[in-house]
């Protein structure tokens, strides 16, 4: 016990102070894209053609963050003249239509479900379902349990059984083989319940979009309350989404 206390004293306080203080992510991080709508038409078309996810609509000059995997191709092709990725990680929305954006996103708390906050504001228990994911989104959700992020200090926990949960967090493109397990997990959760789609695969099918073997978005199968884009979303993106939607 004395050794443990000594080690704790030497280590000091390691938990992030977010959201009380602003967090500045490294310059290499790609967050919310800024779009120059005055960019040359041929440059916009070149970015749209180069996008591996068909996430850029050249006619409307918008990016679908639900499809975007934040690879940075559009920024490299335009040399920052059309698209520039900021370090803003607060990019989650409660309406999928808001993911098709021109550089700005509505405040998540302004569109949140007020009755969810009333019900789950003090305690939120979630069951995570990996529906054929690559484990990237899953890993960045798991890291929220570490001392640095310490998700439990906000009253939010991941639980082993859906019968103990208030909702599900779904990652992966939802393959045909995982649909039955997903539906059974969803049905096992008592109402009212929430559904959260994490990552481009869960939101739109990601790189597998269009395949007959996966869904074309979780919202085509279940009513989704919260969309967290990214490939994978940064742990702070997940944390911000949970706090803004259920706690703000």
Image (cartoon, rainbow, N blue to C red):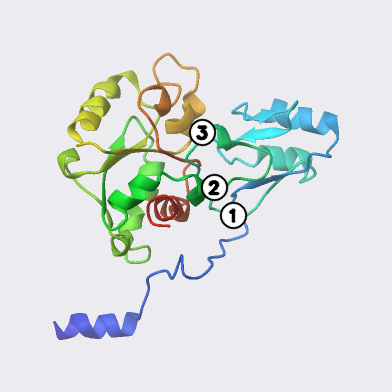
- Residue located at (46% from left, 70% from top): 20
* Distance between the alpha carbons at the discs numbered 3 and 1: 19 Å
Farthest residue in the top direction? 212
Q: Is residue 157 visible?
A: yes
Q: Is residue 156 left or right of residue 98?
A: left
The label number, if any, that marks residue 30 in the structure image:
none
Q: Return the residue at label 2.
A: 91
Total residue callouts: 3
Q: Return the residue at label 1.
A: 88
For label 3, the SS is helix
Relative to residue 4, is residue 76 depicted above or below? Answer: above
Sequence-wise, the earlier of marks 3 and 2 is: 2
Q: Is residue 139 visible?
A: no
Farthest residue in the left direction? 1
Q: Nearer the viewer, mark 3 or mark 2?
A: 3
* Distance between the alpha carbons at the discs numbered 2 and 1: 7 Å
Q: Hey, which quadrant is residue 239 in on the image?
A: bottom left
* Distance between the alpha carbons at the discs numbered 3 and 2: 12 Å
Whether pointer 2 and pointer 1 mark residues with C-beta atoms closer than 8 Å, the reply is: yes
> Quadrant location of the C terminus?
bottom left
- Residue located at (42% from left, 50% from top): 245
- Residue located at (59% from left, 49% from top): 31
Residue 243: where, in percent of width, then height? Answer: 41, 55
Residue 183: where, in percent of width, then height? Answer: 25, 25
Relative to residue 153, is residue 123 depicted above or below? Answer: above
For label 1, the SS is loop
Q: Nearer the viewer, residue 48 or 92?
A: 92
Q: Return the residue at label 3.
A: 96
Q: Nearer the viewer, residue 248 or 136?
A: 248
Whether pointer 3 and pointer 1 mark residues with C-beta atoms closer than 8 Å, the reply is: no
Q: Is residue 16 left or right of residue 159?
A: right
> Quadrant location of the N terminus?
bottom left
């Amino acid at each position: 016990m004395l050794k443990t206390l000594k080690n704790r004293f030497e280590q000091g306080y390691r938990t992030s102070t977010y959201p009380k203080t602003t967090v500045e992510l490294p310059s290499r991080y790609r967050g919310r894209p800024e779009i120059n709508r005055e960019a040359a038409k041929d440059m916009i078309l070149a970015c749209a053609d180069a996008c591996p996810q068909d996430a850029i609509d050249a006619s409307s000059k918008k990016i679908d963050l639900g499809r975007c995997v934040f690879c940075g191709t559009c920024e490299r092709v335009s040399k920052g003249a059309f698209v520039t990725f900021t370090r803003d990680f607060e990019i989650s929305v409660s309406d999928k239509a808001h993911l098709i954006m021109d550089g700005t996103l509505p405040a998540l708390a302004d569109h949140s479900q007020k009755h969810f906050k009333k019900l789950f504001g003090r305690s939120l228990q979630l069951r995570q379902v990996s529906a054929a994911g690559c484990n990237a989104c899953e890993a960045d959700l798991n890291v929220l349990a570490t001392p640095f992020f310490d998700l439990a200090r906000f009253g939010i926990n991941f639980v082993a059984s859906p019968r103990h949960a208030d909702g599900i967090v779904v990652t992966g493109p939802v393959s045909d083989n995982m649909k039955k397990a997903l539906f059974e997990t969803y049905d096992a959760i008592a109402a009212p319940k929430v559904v959260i789609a994490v990552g481009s695969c869960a939101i739109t099918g990601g790189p597998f979009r269009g395949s007959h073997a996966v869904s074309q978005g979780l919202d085509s199968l279940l009513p989704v309350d919260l969309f967290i884009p990214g490939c994978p979303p940064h742990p702070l993106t997940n944390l911000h989404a949970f706090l803004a939607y259920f706690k703000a």
